Image (tube, rainbow, N blue to C red):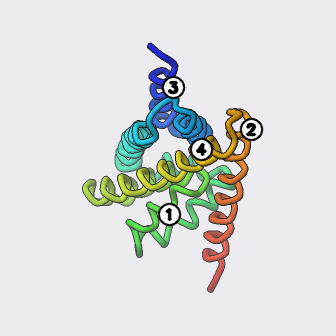
């Protein structure tokens, strides 16, 4: 097994397991793609497949584990804030909210659990999840790719890409929080 195949396997496993550092791994693989290590389209496809499979498992957990799993998670302040934001919005605008939730810390995990606990139709959830994970993984992989094209030193490329992702993620989180408190 060569390095790029091993990297893609690690990316799939990290994408599959909720709360593992998918973003950092995906940024790194985007950098690898920029430097000729692997195909960017393959990186996006592998990460999307792992995230999509994870979402379906979390949806099933939410559907069959119900509110108990969410209640346990909501003991953490940041997760409780995320659930508060999702609560009313998922009922009014479910598909766009699930797509946007991907950019929030633990948003994909919470959105999938919440959608399952609300007993959304599986086909609607799958469609929203597929769109959300594809857009999110493309965005993160392209950030890594851009960083890898701008700076050829992998460590500096990763730091640059992480900084941009952190800034953009913070702006999105701020906007979501601000809209959540607006009357």
Which one is closest to the eye, mark 1 or mark 2?
Answer: 2
Label ID, residue 100: 1
> Residue 13: where, in percent of width, then height?
47, 29
Give the CA separation, mark 2 to mark 3. Answer: 19 Å
Instruction: Check residue 156 in the rendering and tell me which mark sits there, or answer none.
Output: 2
C-alpha separation, residue under disc 1 versus residue under disc 4: 20 Å
Q: Nearer the viewer, mark 4 or mark 3?
A: 4
Indicate which disc residue 169 carries: none
Determine whether the residue tagged by mark 4 lies in a helix, strand or loop: helix
Q: Residue at x 65, y 70 (%)?
A: 177
User: Which residue is tagged 4?
Assistant: 144
Q: How many marks?
A: 4
Q: Is residue 105 visible?
A: yes
- Locate residue 125: give its quadrant: bottom left
Of helix, strand and loop, which one carries label 2? helix
Disc on the earlier residue, 2 or 3: 3
Please give the name of the residue rendered at 31% of the width and 53% of the height, measured from the top-left corner.
126
Mark 1–mark 2 distance (CA, rounded to whole Å): 29 Å
Q: Which residue is mark 3?
A: 7
Which x, y percent locates residue 124?
Answer: 29, 60
1 and 2 marks in contact (CB < 8 Å): no
Secondary structure at numbered mark 1: helix
The tag earlier along the polypeptide, 2 or 4, is 4
The reply, left or right, for residue 78 in relation to residue 107 is right
Residue 170 in the image: x percent, y percent? 69, 60
Mark found first going from the N terminus, 1 or 4: 1
Dot placed on the residue nearer the N-terminal end, 3 or 1: 3
Mark positioned earlier in the residue sequence (4 or 3) = 3
Is 25 above or below relative to 5?
below
């Amino acid at each position: 097994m060569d390095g790029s195949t091993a990297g893609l396997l690690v990316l799939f496993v990290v994408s599959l397991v909720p709360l593992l550092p998918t973003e950092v791994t995906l940024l790194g693989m985007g950098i690898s793609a920029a430097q000729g290590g692997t195909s960017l389209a393959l990186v996006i496809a592998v990460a999307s497949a792992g995230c999509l499979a994870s979402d379906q498992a979390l949806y099933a957990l939410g559907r069959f584990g119900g509110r108990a799993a969410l209640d346990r998670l909501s003991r953490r302040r940041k997760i409780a804030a995320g659930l508060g934001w999702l609560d009313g919005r998922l009922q009014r605008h479910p598909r766009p909210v699930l797509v946007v939730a991907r950019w929030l810390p633990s948003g994909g995990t919470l959105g999938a659990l919440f959608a399952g606990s609300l007993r959304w139709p599986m086909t609607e959830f799958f469609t929203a999840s597929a769109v959300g994970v594809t857009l999110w993984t493309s965005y993160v992989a392209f950030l890594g790719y851009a960083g890898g094209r701008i700076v050829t030193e992998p460590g500096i490329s990763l730091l640059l890409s992480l900084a941009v992702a952190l800034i953009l993620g913070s702006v999105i989180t701020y906007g979501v929080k601000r809209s959540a408190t607006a009357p």
